Image (tube, rainbow, N blue to C red):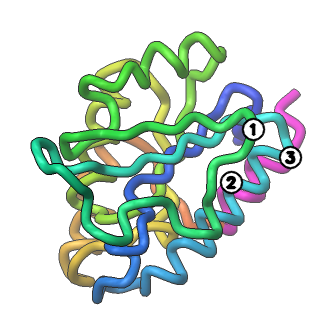
Amino acid sequence: MTIDAVRTALIAVDLMPRLVDQDMGPHRGADVVARAAELATALRDAGGTVVLVRVERPNVAEQPPGSGFVPELQPRDGDVVVVKRTIGAFYGTGLAETLRDRGIDTVVLAGLATTMGVESTARAAADHGFEVFFAADAMSGTTASEHDHALTVVLPRFGAVHPTSHLLTLLTEDPS
């Protein structure tokens, strides 16, 4: 099995300093960011798309400190930036159309938190007909048990769950 990078987008959900700095489990926010950044680099280098998602609280004059993207995942030319006001990245953002316009049919999900933004985005991605992969160690829950339950029970219903290292191998192989 391989993943055609040109038809694939990494969706990095809510990797913002104010969330990355929280006590997560089982993976520290910094480790999640490092793995997501590794996936982003590999996809960009292989001609894929990187989608950076952050959340804004609706109906507030100013967002809390740390609401931008972490330094390791600042938007680059060609990236898609999504500002959401709900839990998932698809509702009301035009993300599905943007991905289709780019010829994307596969998404790899990473980010925080596993059972919130990542899971909600995954459900919508599946509903929109995208093939879904999960970077198991490039995401984390608010607790280890919550994260593990999602990886073993919930997320496999929507797509394939793999460690980042395995996804990187699939992305670097020639899909032909």
Q: Is residue 105 above or below residue 140?
A: above
Q: Is residue 170 magenta?
A: yes
Would you name the residue on which mark 2 appears?
40
| 171 sits left or right of 126 in the view | right
**Which of the two residues, 66 or 149, is positioned nearer the viewer here?**
66
Residue flagged by tag 3: what amino acid is it? Asp
The answer to which quarter of the image holds residue 148 is bottom left
> Residue beneath label 1, please?
77
Task: Rate crowding at label 2 as few (under 14), some (14 to 19) or many (20 or more) other CA atoms within 10 Å.
Answer: many
Majority SS type along the magenta span = helix
Label 2 residue SS? helix
Residue found 33% across the figure and 52% down from its top: 118
- Image coordinates of residue 4 in percent, x first then y, are 74, 32
Amino acid type for the residue under numbered disc 2: Ala
Chain part drawn in magenta: 165-176
Q: Of the residues under marks 1 and 3, which one precedes in the sequence?
A: 3
The circle on residue 45 is 3
Q: Which numbered marker is on residue 33?
A: none
